[in-house]
Image (cartoon, helix red, strand yellow):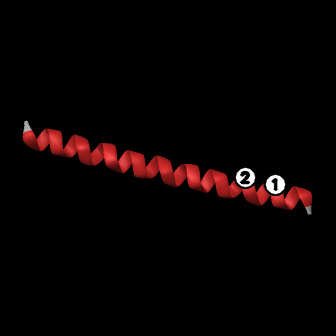
Amino acid sequence: NFDVFSTMVLLGLGLKKFVLILEALNWILNLESSVFSTS
């Protein structure tokens, strides 16, 4: 049970990091597109 719990926690942390990276990439892309549209 402990192994399953630890793997679930690791998967949860990995998903959080993955979501944060996706949000950062999306923010950067939106920033670049807005800069290109204004220039």
**The C terminus lies in quadrant:** bottom right
Residue drawn at the location 54% of the way across and 51% of the way down? 22
The residue tagged 1 is 34
Residue 11 falls in image quadrant: top left
Residue drawn at the location 42% of the way across and 52% of the way down? 17
As helix, strand or loop, the secondary structure at mark 2 comes to: helix
In this rendering, would 36 be left or right of 18?
right
Neighbour class for label 2 at 10 Å: few (<14), some, many (≥20)? few
The residue tagged 2 is 30
Q: Percent from the top left, x then y, of residue 21?
A: 51, 55
In this rendering, would 20 be left or right of 7?
right
The reply to whether callout 2 and callout 1 are in contact (CB within 8 Å) is: yes
**The N terminus lies in quadrant:** top left
Total count of labels: 2
In this rendering, would 7 be left or right of 11?
left
Q: Which amino acid, mark 2?
A: Asn
Q: Measure how far apart labels 2 and 1 are at the Cα level.
A: 6 Å
Q: Which amino acid, mark 1?
A: Ser
Give the residue furthest to the bottom: 39
